[in-house]
Image (cartoon, rainbow, N blue to C red):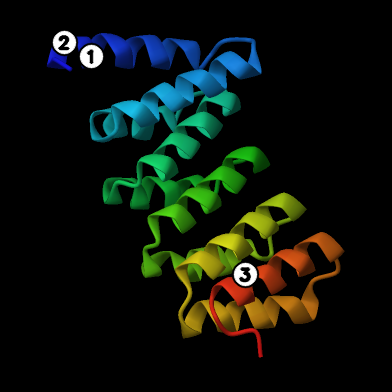
Amino acid sequence: MTRIANEQDLKIHISRLSAPDKDVRAEAMRGLVALGRPAVPACIALLQDGDWKVRYRAAEALGLIGDGEAYAPLIAALADEKDHVRYMAAKGLGLLGDPRAVVHLGAMLRDENEFVRRSAAGSLGAIGGEAAIGLLRAAMNDEVSDGVRAAILAALRDAGRLS
């Protein structure tokens, strides 16, 4: 695909992230992922959009594209006011697999939102390592939600050390 076609596609996908229809936004996100690396700078910029649904889909695209440039912006998105964005940022960090994210994801195990905690647990399991396992085990002791506890157990299995 030519650079100009990529730029045109990028603009179209970005504009569709604000569509009222959820399916259209999801399709736009998949279009950004299909563009790959050229979409990363735009997706990073979209993490500052005023519409949480755009930030959510931008975080999702960044995780699925898997480019290391997304690491710091996804870490910053863990502090987003909207739980959906925090959830997707945590998920994206797990997809990146960067062990530097472990401490930040560990902090998300105390998020007020159960789905954010589940996502953080899953990402810690995907990244693995002794630090992630320690954070997951510690979180299990304090977690009251059965759903999050199940996510922590699955993450411990994924990390390869359930004992």
Q: Is residue 15 left or right of residue 22?
A: left
Distance in Å between CA atoms under marks 2 and 1: 5 Å
From the viewer's side, name the closer residue of 150 and 76: 150
Q: Which residue is mark 3?
A: 155
Image x and y of residue 129, in percent: 46, 80
Task: Look at 43% across and 64% down and name the residue there.
Answer: 101
Q: Which residue is mark 1?
A: 7
Image x and y of residue 131, in percent: 49, 82
Given contact means CB atoms under 8 Å apart, are the residues at marks 2 and 1 in contact? yes
The quadrant of the picture occupied by the N terminus is top left
Against 130, is 8 above or below? above
Query: Please, what secondary structure does the residue beneath circle 1 have?
Result: helix
Q: Residues within 10 Å of mark 1 (few under 14, many from 20)?
A: some
Would you say residue 120 is visible in this rendering?
yes
Residue 4, label in figure = 2
Image x and y of residue 16, in percent: 48, 11
From the viewer's side, name the closer residue of 3 and 89: 3
Residue kind at label 2, given as amino acid type: Ile
Given contact means CB atoms under 8 Å apart, are the residues at marks 3 and 2 in contact? no
Task: Look at 56% across and 44% down and name the residue there.
Answer: 88
Query: Please, what secondary structure does the residue beneath circle 3 have?
Result: helix
Distance in Å between CA atoms under marks 3 and 2: 42 Å
